[in-house]
Image: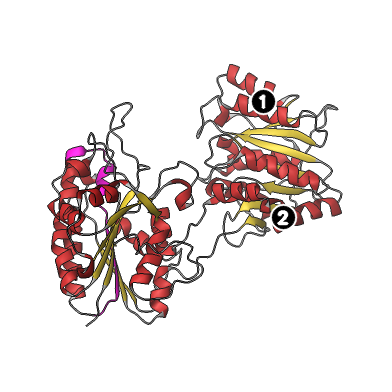
Amino acid sequence: MIKPTFLIILDGWGENPNYEGNAIAQAKTPVVDKITRFYPQTLLQASGISVGLPWEEMGNSEVGHLTLGAGRVIYQNLPRITLSIQDGSFFKNESLSATFESTKKNSGALHLMGLASNGGVHSSLDHLYALIEYAKNAGVGKIFLHLFTDGRDSSPQSGEKVIEEIESRIADDRLVTIASLSGRYFAMDRNDNWNRTEKVYDLLTLGEGKTEKNALETIKNSYQANITDEFIEPTAIADAEGKINTIDEKDSIIFFNFREDRARQLTKAFVLPTFLKFKRKKYLPDIDFACMTQYEENLPVRVAFPPIAVRNCLGEVISRAGLHQLRISETEKYAHVTYFFNGGEEDPFPNEERILVPSQTVSTYDKAPEMSALTITEKVIREIGKGKYSFVLVNFANPDMIGHTGNLPATISAIETIDECLGKLVPEILKLNGTIFITADHGNAEELTNPRTEEADTEHSAFPVPFWYINSQNQRRRTESEIMEGKNSVKGILADVAPTILASMNLKIPPEMTGQNLLEILK
């Protein structure tokens, strides 16, 4: 008889010591309370740099499931690039170095273009400054900045201070010049408004459009005309001799945005040989073009920070051991227990089976807080009765999806539904001498009221998430001090879950998994 190992993800279930606005604390959860009394528990950090997100950023379902399945921290673009600057590897980046060498070989100029913003969503000024430093140290003779103003992920008139900061950084540098400004409305469209992209392309390649003598004055004049950062007209900034510095064939371009979606259109206008969205008056077929990250597959560009391949994730290791596994969730989280948990692999591994339970059709889930949790539970119990699966991954979406509505009573009901499901599921697994790990991908339902404003909070939280370890061997009544320590001590991160599961299954932890085995802690 196969003794199954379960990972049950309570999506959006965090641990918050505060009672106000905390649907989990206010719900009646006799099953979870019993689990806490009789089985070991600790807390896991599920946000910020511990899951590869920018520092202090709340966790999310995609990154949470990716980290849970990978058993390592997969740094997202912003912290990945920032950390490379800090450790010095940025200044050895082969793609960037090749671009600089191409620029010098062609006796051309380097054009750095991207969003000039402190918003941290699409780009980083620190990345821009590092590029300038790297290019100068590499011997690039002339650097032109084509800056896109924000006003969407930052305040509408924050661009003035940003441009002031950039100008102060390059004030005494004769090699670096601001050559143009464009609002992101034009430069970073992602909705096939190609007329906007064309306007920026023509400015950058031909100098067509408005011309001003000073970047800062351009912004101030726009504000006086009630035009905020996002909508600043594409404008060339003439140099001291009145020259407009456009992009020529012998030059090179680095697009320093790290987020992909709003960089694609302008990139395609430059690099695609067959481009039909608008007629390019000046096409540069041999332009050397580099991107910070992969904006899209198969673009003819250099990529400084290509996607990280996730090898030997939990599902792959289990599959390679010849074991059968099951993934089950409802529609809302199906991609998370399959694609994201498998490190970005669409297709199932050998011996991996999947069950999709349809989510209910309602306008908002607070109208059906039970969602499809009971159906999932019934299907899981039926499936494990077949004695086939060594590993089962279950996601209950309720805490997250109802939490996003900000409806406290409905979220309390959702939590009580999950407790009911665990009450049915856990005993059935224990009958098979199975092992159960219960955790979450991030917090949400534990903070539905903003503690500062007392308004409804519909976002994820940065609170840690619980991690329970349940089997017949470790059942014993916990002391009050043990319970309090388990509910208050953060002793791991989400990346520790996969190696812990492999250790419990007596499977070798691959070297790619840098997470820690927490079995010694969970006693």
Closer to viewer: mark 2 or mark 1:
2
Q: Position of residue 146 (x, y in %)?
A: 69, 37
User: Which one is nearer the viewer's eye here, 33 or 216?
Assistant: 33
For image coordinates 14% across by 66% down, the residue present is 427
Asked whether residue 480 is drawn in magenta, I would say: no
Do callouts 2 and 1 mark residues in contact (Cβ within 8 Å)? no
Q: Position of residue 222 (x, y in %)?
A: 61, 22
Q: Position of residue 423 (x, y in %)?
A: 14, 60
- Tell me the quarter of the picture where residue 452 sits: top left
Residue type at numbered disc 2: Lys
Q: Is residue 176 left or right of residue 383?
A: right
Q: Which residue is mark 2?
A: 92
Q: Position of residue 113 (x, y in %)?
A: 67, 42
The residue range painted magenta reads 388-409
Secondary-structure class at tag 2: helix
Q: Quadrant of the C terminus?
A: bottom left
Q: Which residue is mark 1?
A: 164
User: Which one is nearer the viewer's eye here, 400 or 205?
Assistant: 400
Q: Quadrant of the N terminus?
A: bottom left
